Image (cartoon, grey):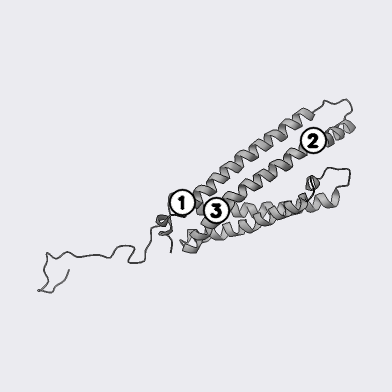
Amino acid sequence: MSMDPTTNPCTPVYMPNASSLGDKRPLRGFLKVVCIFFIILGSLGVLFTIQGVLGMLIVGLMSDEKQFNPMKIFPGAMAVAVLVMTINFAVSVLEIVGGIWGLQQKLKGARLIRNVAGFMAIFKIAETAYGCVVNYLSIGPVMEQTTKQMQEQQPNGPDLGFVIQIAMVVSIGLAVVFGLVMFFFYLFTFLRFSKQETLSQFS
């Protein structure tokens, strides 16, 4: 309280608000979940890419011409698979960086999350379509190879070709559902991080 006798005690005292002090509210709710989820998705993406590269090398080195190789399911399949893995690896790294910067409430983190989400909303459709096509084309060769191997081991064993077909069709359906879920997540994230209200919480 001022001790100046000339000060009018009825004069209102204005306190600087949080924004003028440079303070920002901590991230809460959906924004914080997105940042954390981006870090998790990015980490899983890096691990899956490494696993995919190792699997591709093992299949290429250990399989012979008689065994079914999904990387040769159609002309150029190997090149497309490598391209998809490369894009996923790059996006995964950007997701980790964007998520970390986002939790630090850096504006460049929010913009990176928005850009990655916008790209992935489109890329996820193409990636899901590619995966479904490969799995669909693989149903026949996988059934044939599995049935042949089972007959060699158990000549009088049951025919599980129909079960294998059903399992692969179900896997395609689950891939479509997962792709749609991720598409809407990325789309909603892009729209949310495109709002000025959201960007104002980052600096």
Q: Amino acid at mark 1?
A: Arg
Q: Quick one: label 3 or label 1, which is nearer the N terminus? A: 3
Q: Position of residue 157 (x, y in %)?
A: 85, 26
Q: Mark 2 — residue? A: 140
Q: Position of residue 183 (x, y in %)?
A: 57, 45
- Up the image or down, 179 lies above or below 32; here it is above
- Which quadrant: the C terminus? bottom left
Q: Position of residue 10 (x, y in %)?
A: 12, 64
Marks 2 & 1, CB-CB < 8 Å contact: no
Residue at 87%, 34% in the rendered image: 148
Q: Amino acid at mark 3?
A: Gly
Q: Residues within 10 Å of mark 2 (few under 14, many from 20)?
A: some
Residue at 69%, 53% in the rendered image: 84
Q: Mark 1 — residue? A: 192
Q: Which quadrant would residue 201 be assigned to in this image?
A: bottom left
Residue at 43%, 58% in the rendered image: 199
- Which quadrant: the N terminus? bottom left
Marks 2 & 3, CB-CB < 8 Å contact: no
Q: Mark 3 — residue? A: 118
User: In the figure, is residue 145 to the left or right of 181?
Assistant: right
Q: Amino acid at mark 2?
A: Gly
Q: Secondary structure at mark 1?
A: helix
